Image: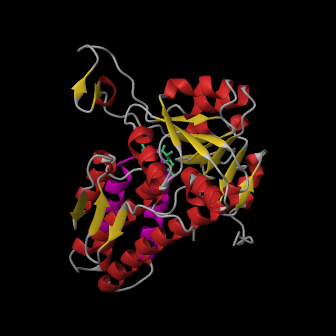
Amino acid sequence: MNETARVQPIEWLGDRVRILDQTLLPGRIEYIDTGDYRVVADAIRRLCVRGAPAIGVAGAYGAALGALALKNGDSDTFLKEFNSILGFLASTRPTAVNLSWALSRVEAAARRPRTIPEIKEAVVAEAQAIQRHEEEATDRLSRYGADLIGDGFTVLTHCNAGSLATCGCGTALGVIKAAKAQGKKLHVFATETRPLLQGARLTAWELVQERIPVTLITDSMAGHFLSKGTIDAVVVGADRVAANGDVANKIGTYSIAVLAGENGVPFYVAAPLSTIDLAINSGKDIPIEERNHAEVTHIAGVRLAAEGVEVANPAFDVTPAKHVSAIITERGVVRPPYSPRLERLFGPELETKA
Ligand code: MRU
């Protein structure tokens, strides 16, 4: 375990789940306490809980709440109704594969026992196991990634891939926190991450709490600082990694990756195995979520753009594998060529970093 403090975005309370409402951060710390899977689905859709691993954990707890609320009829009817709840939860956000990964795990857990009370128990236990799994995976990958960060480095990150996004110490921020725990002196440049400002609101907040020096920049400043030699490495998280190493992450990641390559700065992606989707050959097949246009025309509820303007709002983009220097996972650091190296990660348990 990293010895760093961590914010807990999701907590299981036995028959309810508690979700930290990230839309209100850093101004207000408020929780959504619910026993209703539809409220969890709404929290995922509205980004009260966000970040690929945290979305998976929230989805699994949503499924657990759905199972607990179902009547103890015959198990065929139960499983049919349970599967429709899983479908509803899966539809909330399409890009992060962690959600469908977690829901497939709870679906498999529900098929094993015979009686309905046992099914309910198994689904809750599986959701808790998924949360523990993600915590441990991010701790491990952070220690692998820390070795890529030199003493005195300035690291640029985009969006928020910290505790808030993972339930653990974070992926990209986990790497930075683990490098700090090794005694390295670091500075982070965080992009504000328009339209929803996860960098300005969440990453800056997490790093200030961790006492890691952080400079907030607007997204369009990244190229300037990369070209000036200010940045030693870029580390970002991912929502889905295809078998060939193409990476879907927050919109704007692709531009940063290209600019990093242009300026000879390594571009690292930190992602647990739950984010790697071997069923998808290349990034072309990754579904990209299109979000509400008001997120672009408005900031904090205030309209900035003219009425009637046309808007596009893809929440993610795909960075082709050729721009990715390495992918940091809980089973080690993978360098190109990613195919078939990513596939080999899913083999028998490899020796993991202590
Ligand atoms: O729309 P969001 O806030 O869910 O997007 C989050 C990201 O793009 C993160 O970089 C990604 O999920 C990795 S989190 C460890």
Q: Please give the name of the residue rendered at 54% of the width and 25% of the height, measured from the top-left corner.
A: 221
The residue closer to the viewer here, 227 or 91, is 227
The N terminus appears in which quarter of the rendering?
bottom right
The x and y percentages for residue 192 are: 45, 34
Q: Residue at x 34, y 26 (%)?
A: 296
Q: Is residue 161 above or below residue 300?
A: below
* Left or right of 301 in this view: 177: right
For the point 35% across and 49% down, the residue is 92
Q: Is residue 48 left or right of residue 132?
A: left
The residue under the point 48% across, 41% down is: 159
Q: Is residue 85 magenta?
A: yes
Is residue 229 at all visible to an observer of this figure?
yes
41 with respect to 190 (left or right): left
Q: Main secondary structure of the magenta part?
A: helix
For the record, the magenta segment spans 81-109
**Residue 168 image point, x, y percent:** 49, 63
Pick the front one: 172 or 49: 172
